[in-house]
Image: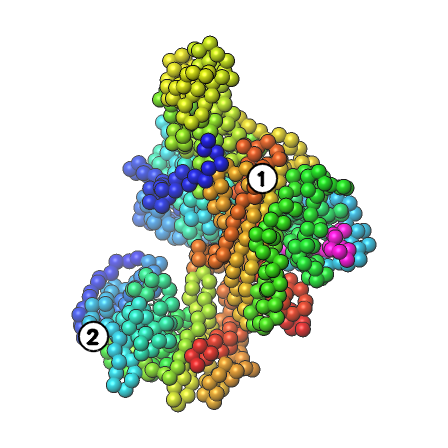
């Protein structure tokens, strides 16, 4: 059976040889036009004059469109209808698309786009959280508040209290393939769109609205993305809609891709947060009461900010049973790029908050930080003596971290290394090593419950080959391979017999974004359903031919055994069924059970289950410069019964490195006018292969999902991102040993931030 | 990029003549100039490539012990060929950019460009080098005149650089992690008659000599000699990669490291 085998990514060879096709590699018909947006150069104000004559007369330009030229809905928002494709006269951030240039080449379009002469009536932009808060500039009427018990009273009665505030920066997605789309006009006014998107149905929906046709007139196809990370959940809308409008306007195929700098300037990023906390606890370190305030920088449009900020609140407990907690979340509207989905979808920010609290308490009590965490863990299944519910009232019934923590501490030799590092640090004044553990408990399911559904379409051809299609998209994570393994296993055939095909809204309709880590969970189940329908029909027919019952027909090892004596190949079986006029095509459908969630009250069961992980990171820090290195990372991650351990370990490694990058080197800087100054790899530092830890031990926990998921596996896309928090905590641990006060690191902990923190603590001595 | 003409002369004299044309510009390795032209920030009508001029290539020792490097010598060649005589210089060259940059970029181009975060200006000033042009010789102390500004006249070519070889030297480069240019770089060189300390990446006026440290180190060439000395943050660059205070502080740290590595 191919499920659970560590097979390589289905397109690995194509990726490495360069043969894998992305949108921009797709051969285009002659006459294809190329598009570019003209961008706002001010962060807030109104356009008073827009002279596009120099743009129109620029070489190669075919047409220039403004909001007035748009025939139908001028909107590319995934949520609130507040994101015009082209400015309606107001501008809200530097980089906002104002007009659209159609030209004979990518370059001609970009060159022309810069030639507009634009007059603005500038207003003072709101750029910082403080400015937005002071102006009460926000989404939703006021803060969202989730509460359990009376946190203020619990803190007041607690023997000890720590409090603090810190800043947590955003993050650029830096998918290797930038945003791209291609629209091919069809004979009846319809549109075929090729899009680098995690959400083909959303593209279909927005394109249909924009060209004034029903969704049936728009077909969206996505073979693969060169990385998405959430950045292609809603941010591809603008390009696809622009291409479709331009194609409708000219009757010609139209393609658009953002240059890297434009991509960084135009598109949304991870939400930056400021988190304040007040925690009351007893002398043993048991949390009694906790208050969080999240200030969330959402940028100018709503996009996915509400569910992102909700998910941050829903992960403010991480792995800890907290008797009384209050989380207040302000979703602030500023004149910056509209922050959007990014791996973890707010969960990482919420989790950094509580891990920071743990770190602070351990420092305050001079208690081993791992021991402190274990004392506050939720109870293991079947061991809860009292309340074991989250701040939003969900029973934690699958808590794996007691066992995982024990295993990791042992395999990583925690106790001995802790002692060795402490001794080493006493001998060294300039360099200090730090060691930190952090657990992950991440909720799996879309918090917007209706999104938890998926469809699939499977055909078995008369030669026994299988065509596989489902609503999930491939962005390098290996979803297609995992789902193909499921299909191959259901039919008992080798993986090579299963053809993986591009996601296509004409094959599987009404799909959800490939997001929330749910790709394999949802689509794997839908594909299983489709395969099982076909297999049952085949078994029925073959049994009848031999006067047996369907239960006596076994699909295994590329063969079909019919009763005790007959064995034919799957190919022959397919041929027999075809000749017997059996339908060999089926859809499949799945919806996640048990979910029920009220986001206003903050009560219910938003998640089907939790995925767990545990990480231990060792770093070294130089007091004089703040320079630092990750020396070693040990990870134990829970992928349930993994569908493909090789791909899952790849996700864990990549997630950890990306999470550590977010909290260390990836620094977004806007100037005081609101211009993003870090808009290229020369100024924005993502981790490279050489930045991964020298010693990097990643293992999967030997477990099974306690809920009925596809082959009892667990989702693995987002959870490991948060293992990177241990790197940030290890830096804090190292810095703490320069003095006696708490380092109170901000994030990202760049070398300079660490230098400042080291001075803060050592000045205290 | 705008259109331009291209010439590849074989002698300095022909290059100088070709550069006499209006808006002609010398082309070294093109690692700085070509990106600038692509962005249309430079629009020379003619590029005069210096890479075909044999007399501007290579590294050689002079009788007085100094080292001469042709103005069109690539970073990679300096890294390989200066290693025996002037290891600190070779080491500096071997850490510029990436292999592509080192195989193309030239010492003459780097010094003519005088980027405030570039490495070679620190070596030239720190060594007390002499910049040799087609017309004259210029002492490094007179050559660097602020950001992207040098003593070169229009059309003047750096044909070579003459480096006195110090008793001990070292270059410490603190990487700006994204671009890997110097956030701060310090070149320390100890000669029989004193110590020179040149700092790149840090000042609003480009590469400069840190004279307090030079005096202290001339008296005692040890990292401790720099204790208590501090560059005034006021004149430092503060930008998205580092504050003035941080840069001023790093100068002291890197100077000590360079001294420790050199002695
Ligand atoms: C990715 C990248 C990373 C880099 N990292 C670093 C780094 O870490 N440290 C560092 O120091 N530099 C770095 N550089 C710059 C690199 O060293 C360049 O090679 C150098 O600055 C310019 O040299 P060039 O020969 O390419 O000059 P060109 O780009 O050809 O020319 C630059 C300027 O100098 C003039 N010029 C060229 N040669 C002469 C000459 N012989 N006489 C008079 N004028 C001349 C040209 O007319 C032009 O104005 C980096 C560059 C890149 C692209």
Instruction: Give the overall secondary structure of the magenta segment.
Output: strand
Task: Choose between A648 and A117: the one closer to the eye.
Answer: A648
Residue occupying image coordinates x 36% and y 45%:
A16
Residue at the disc numbered 1: A703
Q: Position of residue A71 (x, y in %)?
A: 46, 35
Q: Position of residue B171 (x, y in %)?
A: 41, 75
Q: Chain of mark 1?
A: A
The nearer-to-camera label among 2 and 1 is: 1
Q: Quadrant of residue A31?
A: top left
Q: Position of residue A137 (x, y in %)?
A: 64, 50
Q: Do the residues marked 2 and 1 share a common chain? A: no
Residue occupying image coordinates x 42% and y 48%:
A176
Q: Is mark 2 within 8 Å of ligand 1?
A: no
Find the distance from the CA under tag 2 to the CA under tag 1. 71 Å
Q: Is mark 1 within 8 Å of ligand 1?
A: no
Judging from the image, what secondary structure is the residue with disc 2 in?
helix
Please say if B101 is above or below A575: below
| Quadrant housing the C terminus of chain A | bottom right
Q: Chain of mark 2?
A: B
Residue B114 falls left or right of residue A738: left
Please say if A95 is above or below B33: above
- Give yes or no for contact between labels 2 and 1 (Cβ–Cβ under 8 Å): no
Residue occupying image coordinates x 77% and y 55%:
A282
* Coloration of the structure image: rainbow
Q: Quick one: label 2, few (<14), some, or many (20+) residues within 10 Å?
A: some
Q: Position of residue A441 (x, y in %)?
A: 62, 45
Please say if A364 is above or below A350: below
Can residue A199 be seen at all in this image of the molecule? no
Residue farthest to the front?
Answer: A565
Task: Choose between A399 and A272: the one closer to the eye.
Answer: A399
Residue at the disc numbered 2: B55
Q: Which residues are magenta?
A: A273-289
């Amino acid at each position: 059976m191919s499920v659970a085998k560590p097979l390589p990514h289905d397109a690995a060879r194509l990726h490495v040889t360069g043969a894998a096709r992305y949108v921009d590699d797709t051969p285009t018909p002659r006459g294809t036009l190329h598009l570019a947006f003209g961008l706002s150069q001010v962060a807030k104000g109104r356009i008073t004059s827009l002279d596009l004559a120099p743009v129109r007369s620029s070489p190669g330009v075919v047409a220039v469109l403004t909001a007035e030229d748009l025939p139908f809905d001028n909107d590319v928002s995934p949520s609130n209808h507040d994101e015009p494709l082209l400015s309606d006269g107001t501008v809200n951030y530097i980089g906002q698309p104002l007009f659209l240039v159609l030209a004979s080449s990518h370059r001609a379009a970009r060159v022309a786009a810069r030639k507009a002469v634009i007059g603005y009536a500038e207003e003072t932009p709101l750029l910082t959280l403080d400015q937005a808060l002071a102006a009460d500039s926000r989404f939703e009427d006021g803060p969202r508040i989730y509460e359990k018990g009376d946190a203020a009273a619990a803190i007041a009665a607690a023997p000890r209290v720590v409090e603090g505030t810190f800043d947590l920066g955003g993050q650029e997605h830096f998918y290797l393939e930038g945003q791209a789309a291609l629209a091919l006009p069809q004979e009846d006014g319809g549109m075929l769109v090729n899009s680098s998107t995690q959400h083909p149905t959303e593209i279909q929906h927005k394109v249909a609205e924009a060209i004034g046709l029903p969704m049936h007139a728009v077909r969206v196809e996505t073979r693969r993305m060169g990385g998405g990370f959430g950045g292609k959940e809603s941010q591809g809308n603008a390009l696809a809609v622009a291409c479709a409008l331009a194609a409708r306007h000219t009757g010609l195929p139209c393609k658009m891709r953002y240059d890297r700098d434009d991509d960084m300037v135009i598109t949304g990023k991870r939400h930056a947060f400021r988190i304040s906390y007040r925690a009351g606890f007893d002398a043993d370190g048991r949390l009694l009461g906790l208050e969080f305030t999240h200030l969330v920088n959402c940028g100018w449009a709503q996009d996915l900010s509400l569910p992102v900020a909700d998910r941050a609140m829903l992960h403010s407990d991480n792995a800890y049973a907290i008797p009384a907690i209050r989380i207040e979340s302000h979703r602030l509207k500023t004149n910056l790029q509209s922050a959007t989905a990014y791996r973890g979808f707010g969960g990482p920010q919420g989790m950094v908050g509580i891990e920071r609290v743990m770190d602070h308490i351990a420092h305050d009590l001079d208690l081993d930080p791992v021991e402190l965490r274990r004392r506050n863990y939720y109870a293991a299944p079947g061991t809860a003596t009292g309340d074991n519910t989250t701040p939003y009232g969900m029973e934690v019934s699958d808590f794996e971290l007691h066992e995982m923590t024990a295993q990791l501490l042992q395999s990583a030799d925690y106790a001995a290394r802790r002692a060795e590092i402490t001794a080493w640090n006493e001998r060294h004044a300039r360099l200090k090593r730090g060691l930190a553990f952090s657990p992950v408990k991440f909720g799996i399911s879309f918090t917007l419950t209706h999104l938890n559904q998926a469809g699939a379409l499977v055909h078995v051809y008369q030669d026994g080959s299988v065509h596989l299609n489902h609503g999930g998209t491939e962005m390098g994570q290996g979803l297609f391979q995992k789902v193909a393994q499921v299909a191959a296993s259901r039919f008992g055939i080798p993986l090579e017999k299963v053809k993986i095909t591009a996601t296509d809204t004409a094959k599987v309709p009404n799909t959800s974004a490939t997001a929330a880590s749910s790709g394999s969970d949802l689509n794997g189940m839908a594909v299983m359903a489709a395969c099982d329908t076909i297999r049952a029909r085949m078994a029925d027919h073959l049994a009848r031919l031999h006067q047996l019952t369907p239960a006596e027909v076994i699909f295994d090892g590329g063969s079909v055994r019919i009763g005790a004596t007959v064995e034919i190949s799957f190919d022959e079986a397919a041929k027999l069924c075809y000749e017997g006029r059996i339908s060999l095509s089926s859809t499949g459908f799945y919806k996640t059970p048990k979910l029920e969630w009220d986001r206003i009250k903050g009560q219910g069961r938003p998640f089907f289950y939790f995925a767990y992980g545990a990480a231990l990171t060792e770093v070294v820090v130089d007091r004089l410069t703040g320079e630092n290195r990750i020396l070693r990372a040990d990870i134990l991650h829970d992928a349930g019964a993994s569908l493909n351990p090789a791909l899952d370990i790849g996700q864990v490694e990549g997630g950890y490195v990306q999470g550590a990058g977010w909290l260390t080197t990836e620094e977004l800087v806007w100037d005081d006018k609101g211009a993003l100054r870090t808009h290229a790899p020369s100024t924005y530092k993502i981790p490279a292969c050489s930045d991964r830890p020298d010693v990097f031990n990643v293992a999967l926990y030997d477990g099974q999902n306690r809920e009925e998921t596809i082959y009892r596996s667990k989702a693995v896309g987002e959870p490991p991102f948060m293992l990177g928090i241990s790197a940030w905590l290890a830096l804090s641990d190292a810095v703490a040993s320069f003095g006696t006060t708490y380092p109170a690191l901000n994030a990202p902990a760049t070398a300079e931030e660490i230098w400042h923190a080291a001075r803060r603590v050592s000045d205290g001595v | 990029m705008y259109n331009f003409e291209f010439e590849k002369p074989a002698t300095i004299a022909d290059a100088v003549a070709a550069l006499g044309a209006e808006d002609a510009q010398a082309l070294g390795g093109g690692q700085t100039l070509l990106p600038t032209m692509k962005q249309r920030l430079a629009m020379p009508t003619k590029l005069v490539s210096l890479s075909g001029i044999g007399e501007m290539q290579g590294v050689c020792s002079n009788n007085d012990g100094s080292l001469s490097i042709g103005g069109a010598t690539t970073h990679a060649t300096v890294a390989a060929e200066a290693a025996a005589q002037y290891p600190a210089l070779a080491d500096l060259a071997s850490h510029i950019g990436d292999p592509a940059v080192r195989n193309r970029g030239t010492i003459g181009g780097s010094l003519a460009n005088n980027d405030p975060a570039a490495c070679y200006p620190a070596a030239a000033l720190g060594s007390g080098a002499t910049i040799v042009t087609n017309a004259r010789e210029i002492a490094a102390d007179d050559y660097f005149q602020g950001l992207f500004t040098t003593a070169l006249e229009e059309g003047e070519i750096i044909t070579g650089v003459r480096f006195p070889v110090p008793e001990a030297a070292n270059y410490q480069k603190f990487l700006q992690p994204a671009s890997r240019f110097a956030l701060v770089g310090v070149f320390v060189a100890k000669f029989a008659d004193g110590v020179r300390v040149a700092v790149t990446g840090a000042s609003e006026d480009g590469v400069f000599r840190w004279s307090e440290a030079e005096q202290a180190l001339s008296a005692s060439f040890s990292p401790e000699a720099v204790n208590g000395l501090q560059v005034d943050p006021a004149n430092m660059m503060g930008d998205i990669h580092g504050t003035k205070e941080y840069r001023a502080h790093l100068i002291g740290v890197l100077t000590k490291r360079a001294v420790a590595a050199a002695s």
